[in-house]
Amino acid sequence: MSFQIPAFAPALPEIIVMTMACAILVIDLYIAEERRGLTYLLTQLTLVIAALATLGGMPVEPQVTFSGSFIRDTMGDLLKAFIYLMAAGVFLYSRDYLRARKLFTGEFHVTGLFGVLGMMVMVSAHSLLTVYLGLELLSLALYAMVAYDRDSLQATEAAMKYFVLGALASGLLLYGMSMLYGVTGTLDLALLAERLADSDRGDPVLVFGIAFIVAGLAFKLGAVPFHMYLPDVYHGAPTAVTVYIGTAPKIAAFALTMRVLAEGLAPLHADWQQMLVVLAVLSLALGNVVAIAQTNLKRMFAYSTISHVGFILLGILSGTADGYAGAMFYAITYALMALGGFGMILLLTREGFEADNLDDFRGLNERSPWFAFMMLLLIFSMAGVPPTVGFYAKLAVLQAVVQVDMVWLAIVAVLFSVVGAFYYLRIIKLMYFDEVEDRNPLTAAPDLRLALSVNGLAVLLLGLFPGGLMALCIGALT
Amino acid sequence: MLENYLPILIFLAIGLAVGGGAMAAGFLLGPHRPDAEKNSPYECGFEAFEDARMKFDVRYYLVAILFIIFDLEIAFLFPWAVVLGEIGMFGFLAMVLFLGILVVGFIYEWKKGALEWE
Amino acid sequence: MGFDKLVFYVFAAVLVFAALRVITCRNPVHAVFYLVLAFLNSAGLWLLLEAEFLAMTLVLVYVGAVMVLFLFVVMMLDINVAEMRAGMRRFAPVGVGIGILLVVEMALIVRSSAFSPEKFGNLVRSPADYSNTKALGSVLYTEHVYAFEIAAVILVLAIIAAIALTLRKRPKTRYQDPARQVSVRREDRVRLVDVPSEKRG
């Protein structure tokens, strides 16, 4: 037999997360309700060990194993490291929220870890098959987590919408993949790019294949016109789950798009570029404009996500290494901002009270000047105000677009960002210039306060010194 | 390969012919005198209480979905059993790991009491 | 026309008919049974393509298990058919439009040069001792071992999700514990009481 036993070492982080998730699932069954904190600690420990394994074993050259279905490279390792960081933040921020609502169970943590595993598989995918399996693993975890608060009608409805539309999107993606396979006869992304390079470009199978794949990806990213589910899911899900959906999966979705479009379909760049331009412009327009009308902060963040996805798409569609690096920088820093933004909602939330309306932030400055300042930093960063990191991320992406002579696209993006600044500034006005309605003291745990402060300051510090992270992103993609 | 399946096709054809034939014969040869009483649903002599379709307990659904999951597991076992001689120790261990992961799920299921019928 | 071509057209015709009935049936339970018929016929088509394992899996998993679940769900939903059909007229044009779009796409794809018979040369039927299951198995557990193990993880996640979302403990139910039943001893259950015998008179 010609089969060679594959190298397992590159997949060590995946193996660790899978083993630990299974172990936590079983351990959680045998511990008493009041010692559930152990599950939480083990979950965080898993993320730390996985981070050590990922960063400790970073290869210089990309390693492909499992007969070409797995790749370990610098881009993947860097993205995975940030996925662990986001997931750890999510588990920390959501702990007390879940406790107060009797949702603090082993299942939440294990499902979350399996979701992280799904993202890792997506990030390291080197074949359309593993792309799809990773995506399904993540999606299944997300559907379950959205429906997790099963007595809430709103959450159940959100989960149904997410599941039905998500299944449709997976179908579109699979359909597109099957067409590509039909033309090229391979699922391996590197081989796919090779064979596409010398295939007939005008072949309708390829055109439809790309269209279906881009539609599937756009759905998973939440780009207009495939965004319908996003506001309802963000709004309907428990905030602890919204913060999960809003952060790490965005990094994974970026990786997914990179693996499929920038690696597998690289020779057809001109074809998918057109589609991404349409998606990006629509996302920027709709996201920023509709966000203005929102009164619920989670819903507003959902529309803001849509507009940020537009920016990430701008970087990817440029098709240059700078553009990819810009988009990667954007995806990572956006996840950081979203983590902080949802973290603020969780900070103000207490037992029996959800602080997810804009009015709940009224006069925050009087209640807690420090956290009002943190929120100010995060909101400035989302709006792209210097010196926060959001400004730098937008700049990097726009530069890449200008470099490929699409100045009009950059102008459109800037215009809609200015529109978007309006609803971001409204939150700041509420916090600093409006009367306090709710005078309850903040009750959040010290570690949550500390993490949120670090999160807010990170947005500022990364904005002042973006060079390090930017150099990492550029290094990962060249 | 297909010639092996010819007997099955013949079985199918005969089965359809017998089943369809019997129904057709009953329809054609039997007396046919319907009236309102004969066409109404019959429930032990009194009027029907409700629709025949009623809500099932969600527990049936849980049992069914757990069954599907282990049914799929079995589906993976078939080709494995066929080629076990060729894929060697590696293939054997691959299946051991696969089953091991599912056993974790099974422990969870058992311990949670999802298999108990109250 | 060869015999297998005839078989193909029979299966294909019944499949299309059954699929149409799935979406036009008024009674959802009948729709599920038509779906079973559709699955059985597509299993026949797969057999003609010499994908015997997939054909068997389709019957085993989809007809045997998934359809059972569908029946449960359809019965559980207690669907009000009239209510369901209310939006029919409004959405029909969109549905028909999308349907036509898909048919046109399919036609363009099938007629494309990528799938022309010339490209594949002379396709011959495999001999009688060819086993598709063997071909599948020899790569599934070796080359695709990574995907295979991820499939296991997805299945476990499905177990967790299904249980976490549907299992409810009712507080006042009585369980039977076989372990305790078996380990019970005579002393636990039987108490011998000395009852003084009643004296007559």
Image (spheres, coloured by chain):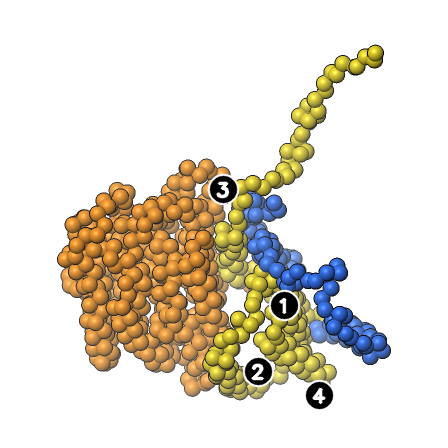
Where on the picture, by quarter, is residue A461?
bottom left
Answer yes or no: is residue A7 visible. yes
In percent of width and height, residue A79 lies at 33, 59
C-alpha distance separating marks 2 and 4: 21 Å
Within-10-Å neighbours for mark 4: few <14, some 14–19, many 20+: few
Within-10-Å neighbours for mark 2: few <14, some 14–19, many 20+: few
* Above or below A339: residue C39: below
Secondary structure under the numbered disc 3 in the rendered image: helix
Name the residue carrying label 3.
A29
C-alpha distance separating marks 3 and 4: 63 Å
Name the residue carrying label 1.
C29
Circle 4: residue type: Met
Which chain gets the blue colouring? Answer: B
Where on the picture, by quarter, is residue A206?
bottom left
Name the residue carrying label 2.
C120
- Viewer-side label of 3, 4: 3
Secondary structure under the numbered disc 2 in the rendered image: helix
Residues C156 and B77: in front is C156
The residue located at (25%, 55%) in the rendering is A360
Check the residue under mark 3 and report the chain it is in: A
